[in-house]
Image: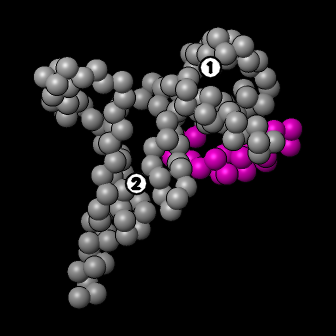
C-alpha cells in the first residue's frame, strides 16, 4: 500500500468511513493524473474503467481527499474548480493566462521563507498557501501585439 493510500485510509477510519473499492479507484485515478483535473473529467476517466462508480460518489469523495490533505482545489476556471494531487509535491504557484487559459506552475521555494518571516512578524500561523497569479502568457502577449 502506498503512503497516500495509508493516509486516506487512516483519515476515513477517523471519520468512521470505509475505504471502499470505489473510493480506492477514485484515489488511484487521481494519483495517476499528473495534471489539473475537473471532477467531471475525473468521472469520465473512471467511468471508462468501471461502471460501478457513480458520479455522486466521485463528487462526494473529492472533499474527503481535500480534507485528508491529498488534493487541493488549484485553479477556478470559467466557474469550474480544478484540482490536483499535492501529496509529495512541493508548494507551487499557479500562473493563469486570462487569454488562453493556460496554467503554468512554479515552485514557491524562493518566496516561502519571506512569507514565513512576514507571518512570524504578524504572529500568524500559516496553515496553507495557495498562490494564483492572473495575467497574459508570452504567447497571448505576442498575439495581442501582432493584432495592433
Q: Quadrant of the N terminus?
A: top right
> In the displayed structure, would residue 52 be above or below residue 103?
above
Q: Residue at x 58, y 40 (%)?
A: 33
Task: Specify whether residue 73 is painted magenta.
Answer: no
Query: Judging from the image, what secondary structure is the residue with disc 1 in?
Result: helix
User: Which labelled disc corresponds to residue 125?
Assistant: none
Q: Viewer-proximal residue, 119 or 83?
A: 119
- Give the magenta part as a residue range: 33-53
Residue 35, visible in the rendered structure: no
Task: State the image coordinates of residue 100 (x, y, percent, origin top left).
Answer: 41, 68
Query: Quick check: is 39 in the magenta stretch?
Result: yes
Instruction: Tell which tag, 1 or 2, sits nearer the viewer.
Output: 1
Is 115 left, or right, of 137 in this rendering?
left
Looking at the image, residue 133 sits to the left or right of residue 80; the answer is left
Image quarter where the C terminus lies is: bottom left
Left or right: where does residue 140 sit relative to residue 51?
Answer: left
Indicate which disc residue 103 carries.
Answer: 2
Rate crowding at label 1 as few (under 14), some (14 to 19) or many (20 or more) other CA atoms within 10 Å: many
According to the picture, the residue beneath numbered tag 1 turns out to be: 8
Amino acid at each position: 500500500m502506498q503512503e497516500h493510500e495509508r493516509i486516506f485510509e487512516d483519515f476515513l477510519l477517523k471519520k468512521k468511513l470505509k475505504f471502499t473499492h470505489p473510493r480506492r479507484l477514485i484515489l488511484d485515478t487521481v494519483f495517476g493524473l499528473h495534471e489539473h483535473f475537473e471532477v467531471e473529467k475525473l468521472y469520465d476517466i473512471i467511468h471508462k474503467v468501471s461502471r460501478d462508480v457513480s458520479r455522486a460518489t466521485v463528487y462526494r469523495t473529492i472533499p474527503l481527499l481535500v480534507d485528508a490533505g491529498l488534493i487541493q482545489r488549484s485553479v477556478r476556471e470559467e466557474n469550474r474548480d480544478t484540482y490536483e494531487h499535492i501529496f509529495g509535491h512541493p508548494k507551487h504557484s499557479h500562473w493563469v493566462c486570462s487569454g488562453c487559459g493556460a496554467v503554468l506552475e512554479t515552485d514557491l521555494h524562493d518566496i516561502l521563507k519571506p512569507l514565513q518571516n512576514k507571518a512570524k512578524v504578524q504572529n500568524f500561523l500559516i496553515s496553507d498557501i495557495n498562490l494564483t497569479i492572473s495575467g497574459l502568457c508570452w504567447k497571448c502577449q505576442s498575439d495581442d501585439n501582432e493584432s495592433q
